[in-house]
Amino acid sequence: MSFLKKILKRSSNKEEETGTQEIFTALDESFVHHFIEKGGKFLYCASIKEVVTNLSKILHENVWTEITALDYNLSGLLRKTEASRKLVFNKETPVFTTCEHLISDNGDILFSSNQLNSYRLAELSDNFIVYATTSQLVRNTGQGLTGIKANFKENIPTNISAIKNYCIKKNDDNFLNYGNTNSKNLYLLLFEDL
């Protein structure tokens, strides 16, 4: 009898593995669909070399010679481009940053004080380049917030906010967003890490 249980358990594990892959693919496709629909510019990267190549093309296309990057890990990618790195945010210089999570259900990108310090999104440049990985995809904002809480148990970041619109001049009639002009011209460099 235990032999049959082992066989049945193995087949159900295979189904679970396949189901997990299908769920991830659904998250990936859903995020990209919503992100592009909102006006975001999406670049899929299968290697770090592709990340650097695409970053260089973005900088060249927009004639950006300076870029703000606070994350030391991103400075390695920037050194391989011709742009100079600034350490202080201002309205004129595009921002190169990471994010906390990519929200599949609506195409939003979730940030915290880990990326933005104490700045509000509205205070920053209209131009963003975000480096993210496929492992940062979550179904909804609730899962994103739970992920932040799990990743930073001892020191939960503050200033958690999301960019929800990737067309700078788009007017948002939602009264809940009144005064929150967080729309950005945003490029997403999505690195496949799974």
Image: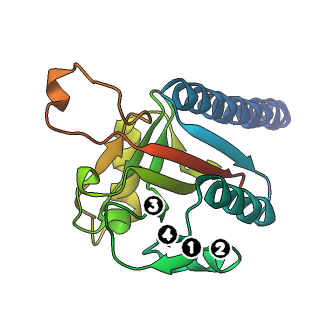
Left or right: residue 169 compared with residue 79: left
Q: Which colour scheme appears in the figure?
A: rainbow
The CA span between labels 1 and 3 is: 14 Å
Query: Crowdedness of circle 4 by 10 Å Cα count: few (<14), some, many (20+)?
Result: many
* Residue 73 sits above or below residue 35 on the image: below
Query: Crowdedness of circle 3 by 10 Å Cα count: few (<14), some, many (20+)?
Result: many
Mark 1 — residue?
Answer: 74
**Residue at (27% x, 71% y) in the render:** 155
The N terminus, quarter of image: top right
Left or right: residue 49 compared with residue 167: right
The CA span between labels 1 and 4 is: 11 Å
The x and y percentages for residue 186 are: 49, 45
Nearer to us in this view, 141 or 45: 45
The CA span between labels 3 and 4 is: 5 Å
| Pointer 1 with pointer 2, Cβ within 8 A | yes
Mark 4 — residue?
Answer: 67
The CA span between labels 2 and 4 is: 12 Å
The tag earlier along the polypeptide, 2 or 4, is 4
Query: Which three-letter amino acid code belongs to the residue tagged 4?
Result: Ile
Query: Crowdedness of circle 2 by 10 Å Cα count: few (<14), some, many (20+)?
Result: some
Instruction: Determine which of the numbered discs, if any, sits on residue 77 in the image.
Output: 2
